Image (cartoon, rainbow, N blue to C red):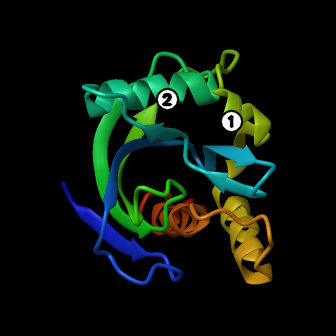
Amino acid sequence: MQLITEIVHPELKSKQGRVFRRHAARGIVMRGEQILLLFTERYNDFSFPGGGLDVDEDIVTGLKRELEEETGAREIQVLQHYGYIEEYRSYWKPQYDLMHMTSHFYQCEVAPQLEPVRMESHEIANGMRPVWINLHEAITHNEAVMQRHESSMGQSILRETYMLRKVASELLMPISL
């Protein structure tokens, strides 16, 4: 397993203290330059589908569950582990000083047709929906949100945009003329 990068959010003063640990699995699903992402209206950003693992859930099972719930993907094939990001950020629960999240990214393939989604209530409230979008358009959009420092900007945009750039530089196949 390859460490992609470590992100310490700027508002975080220390990586020490009472730490909430979270493990997440996220899918990289591409068709040419199109990538399957989630657009979240509340934060006005694009992110990789996936999320936290349930108690005693293995990472591949959790990834498939999250892809099905958030995107409606079926016939999910997990091809390979791409790497992981270690992330330290503030956490909203008062009994913790920070959250340490390890996000594992996997290259996946899914059936051509997406089925209806089964979002969680907070995902629905945030206006989250799956979209196929050109990878470069998603990067440009997220970078513009970060440049403007929009008040609605979520903490995950740093991780997501970093990974979108990495995917664009390493996984896009050059078009031969």
What's the residue at 41%, 76% (across, down)? 8
Name the residue carrying label 2.
66
Seen from the viewer's position, the closer of residues 40 and 165 is: 40
Task: Point out the frontmost of discs 2 and 1.
Answer: 1
Residue 80, percent from left and from top: 28, 41
Where, by quadrant of the figure, is residue 71 drawn? top right
What's under tag 1, amino acid-wise? His
10 Å crowding of disc 1: few (<14), some (14-19), many (20+)? few
Q: Residue furthest front?
A: 95
Seen from the viewer's position, the closer of residues 2 and 86 is: 86
Left or right, 152 with respect to 104, comes to right
Seen from the viewer's position, the closer of residues 147 and 34 is: 147
Residue 152, percent from left and from top: 78, 64
What's the residue at 51%, 69% (across, down)? 162
- Identify whether 129 is placed above or below 134: above
Name the residue carrying label 1.
122
Residue 67, percent from left and from top: 51, 29
Whether residue 110 is visible to the viewer of this picture, yes or no, is no
Work out which quarter of the rendered image holds the C terminus and state it.
Answer: bottom right
Q: Residue furthest left?
A: 1
Element type at mark 2: helix
First-in-chain label (2 vs 1) = 2
- Identify whether 5 is placed above or below 29: below
Residue 133, percent from left and from top: 71, 48
Mark 2 vs mark 1, CA separation in Å: 14 Å
Seen from the viewer's position, the closer of residues 102 and 164 is: 102
- Identify whether 144 is placed above or below 79: below
